[in-house]
Image (cartoon, grey):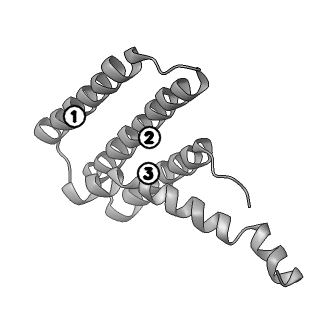
């Protein structure tokens, strides 16, 4: 069975961002819904990418850097929380589309696992009877 990589999830997340933005504009026909979904999904995509880089940097090195844990992670969290507060307070957003946009990483993980389950390995198991 193919191993899931963070890059696979990131690619699916970008696809969901683009597809969801197009669908929200076509279905709702208002910029407010597009903005709500696209901004939240973009924030989650960037958050996932930054976390991936921090974690990969920690595992590739033989020792874990205290700078990564004590400075980068809290700083990233504060920037993300501040950005979300500014958007929620000052942005003209729709809460439902914003929450759907925030859940795109979860959707990406679920879609990735479904693709892997129904992928070529499952077909070989059925054919070989294993």
Q: Residue at x 56, y 29 (%)?
A: 59
Q: Which residue is mark 3?
A: 105
> Residue 121's image quarter?
bottom right
Q: Nearer the viewer, residue 74 or 24?
A: 74
Q: Which residue is mark 1?
A: 81
33 on left or right of 24: left
Q: Considering only order in the chain, which callout, 1 or 2, is on the residue closer to the N terminus? A: 2
Q: Nearer the viewer, residue 125 or 40?
A: 125
Can you give x and y, in whole percent of width and height, for residue 101 in the image? 35, 52
Q: Marks 2 and 3: CB-CB under 8 Å?
A: yes
> Residue 56's image quarter?
top right
Residue neighbourhood size for the residue with mark 1, other residues' Cα within 10 Å, grouped as few (<14), some (14–19), many (≥20):
few
> Residue 48's image quarter?
top left
Q: Nearer the viewer, residue 17 or 10?
A: 10
Q: Which mark is residue 45?
A: 2
Can you give x and y, in whole percent of width and height, for residue 64 in the image? 48, 21
36 on left or right of 128: left
24 on left or right of 58: left
Measured in 3D between alpha carbons, the distance from the residue under mark 1 to the one under mark 3, in whole angstroms, is: 17 Å
Q: Marks 1 and 3: CB-CB under 8 Å?
A: no
Q: Residue at x 50, y 63 (%)?
A: 110
Secondary structure, mark 2, is helix
Q: Residue at x 69, y 72 (%)?
A: 118
């Amino acid at each position: 069975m193919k191993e899931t990589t963070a890059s696979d999830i990131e690619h699916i997340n970008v696809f969901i961002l683009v597809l969801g933005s197009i669908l929200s504009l076509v279905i709702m026909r208002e910029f407010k819904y597009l903005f709500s979904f696209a901004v939240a999904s973009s924030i989650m995509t960037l958050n996932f990418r930054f976390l991936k880089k921090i974690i990969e940097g920690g595992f590739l090195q033989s020792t874990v850097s205290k700078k990564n844990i004590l400075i980068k992670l809290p700083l990233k969290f504060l920037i993300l929380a501040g950005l979300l507060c500014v958007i929620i307070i000052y942005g003209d957003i729709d809460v439902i589309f914003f929450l759907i946009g925030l859940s795109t990483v979860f959707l990406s993980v679920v879609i990735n696992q479904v693709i892997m389950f129904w992928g070529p390995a499952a077909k070989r198991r059925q054919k070989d009877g294993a």
